[in-house]
Image: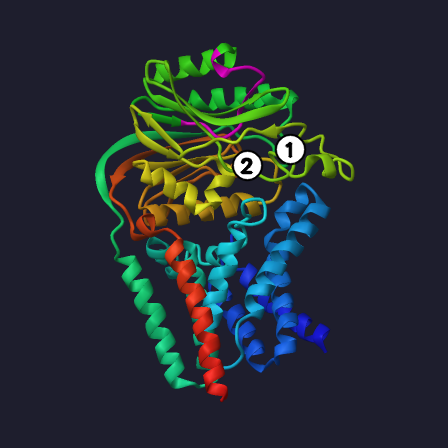
Amino acid sequence: MKRRAALRAVPAGVLVTLALPPFGWWPLAIVGVALLAGMLERSSIEHRWPVAAGFAIGFVAPGLFWMSEFSLPGWVLAMLIEAVIVTAAISIVPPGRFQIVGLPAAFVLADAFRGRWPFSGVPIATFGETQTGGPIMQAARVGGTLLIAALVALAGLTLLSVVRLRARRSLVGLVLVAAVVLAATHAADGSRASTFRAALVQGGGKRGTRAISSSAARVFDAHVAATAKVPDGVDLILWPEDVVDVDDDILTTPQGDKLSSLAAMHAATLVAGVVSGKKTYFLNVARAWGPDGSPGPVYEKNHRVPFGEYIPFRALVSKVADVSAVPVDAHIGHGPGILPTRAGRLGVVISYEVFFARRARAAMKAGASVLLVPTNASSYSSTQMPALELGDARLRAIETGRQVLQAAPTGFTAVVDERGRVHQRTDLGRQQVLTATVERRHGATLYTTLGDGPFVLGALAALALSWLLTRRAGR
């Protein structure tokens, strides 16, 4: 019986996954949640966790499938851990009519917890990411992806009420969702201070290849060649993450000399992703060169990719798995991602950091007027990870009220405005240069001011309230 309940819930989770990039069919998330809510409503306490587990696996397993391109066992392990978190959150929602309070709270708590644990969080394939491209996405300006998660749950519960002809609940749900989205759409998102010209460089090349020393020169040369296509008159040239790979301090290498000369030749600030290897660790930074070719400020990546840039419990893991692809761990950077340059105060989140709203928010708190996302998803042969990264870049733009410039060696390189609209985007694998007039913006959104804290506390209070109301109704 429990197995049957779990299997029936899997399609509901799959529908929610189909709302994520690269599919982006955002209304299906609402349909999937409506199906889940309907099954939970009819389930006894003992059968609620199998329903939640089936839904969680249907949602998380395909949403994290990009991991299988690195490690099939790693994907299975990650899927199980993340599914347990989602299952636990949904299982504690009370049965009955007050799940209209409890289920949105559970979605918020699931996404919030996944953003912090394990390994400091893996906030990928979350409820908050399902609305990229839909109207609910604009709620990020007020409450980030946690508010989006709550609205997805509320919209699904409203759809269930419509199907079951519950007029009052349907009307209340529709009014609440519409009111929040409308208010968020018109909420303050800062204002334009000035503009500058930017060029985003994509060197191109074959996808699905790992970054290895033998290909480092080819990748670097491809980006040098692409930079030759940069037109005159730009103020900023952005290169992707990890397209400059050296053993020593970049300023002492021929690659550093070349980057300096490119910046001087174009009389532009140049920001490039540099990885420098050490015997015991390596650095992953975004380094700037000034328009005169002089070395500028550096930002070191704070949030490392588990099993990609460092091996948790290396001594133990190395006994049961091959860790040669990551022979040493990345050094941990500190502080907000900010580069004060002639082109402006540039906020930076490097690759994986784009999935963490708190990293972009820290850059805004440090006075960033634009957000840069140098990234590298060339190791993935599918479009799933590049599409997820671009989806989160759009969310970060809305949350911060800043325009976002994303550069990747094989795509997607893109220009995103402060409303989350993609104005330009490259094709995967091609050598391309995007040029755009970009706004330097100032001012704060409500989300930049508040962060996630109030919404997590509100979700905890709402979950407690839903149980209190349920118990009182049962007397």
Horizontal and vertical percent position of residue 388: 51, 48
Number of marks present in the image shown: 2
Q: Is residue 134 above or below residue 207?
A: below
Mark with earlier residue (2, 1): 1
* Residue annotated with mark 1: 209
| Magenta-span inclusion, residue 249 | yes
Q: Residues within 10 Å of mark 1 (few under 14, many from 20)?
A: few
Horizontal and vertical percent position of residue 416: 37, 43
Outermost residue on the bottom side: it is: 475
Q: CA distance from mark 2 to mark 1?
A: 20 Å
- Give the residue type that dot 2 points to: Arg
Residue 437 in view here: yes
The kind of secondary structure element at disc 1 is: loop
* Residue annotated with mark 2: 304
- Give the residue type that dot 1 points to: Thr
Is 370 on the left-hand or right-hand side of 410?
left
Horizontal and vertical percent position of residue 56: 61, 63
Quadrant of the image containing the N terminus? bottom right
The kind of secondary structure element at disc 2 is: loop
Horizontal and vertical percent position of residue 401: 31, 46
Residue 14 in view here: no
Is 93 on the left-hand or right-hand side of 349?
right
Residue 187 sits in which quadrant? bottom left
Q: Residue at x 33, y 53 (%)?
A: 141
Q: Is residue 203 above or below residue 87?
A: above
Is 430 on the left-hand or right-hand side of 206?
left
Boundaries of the magenta span: 238-251
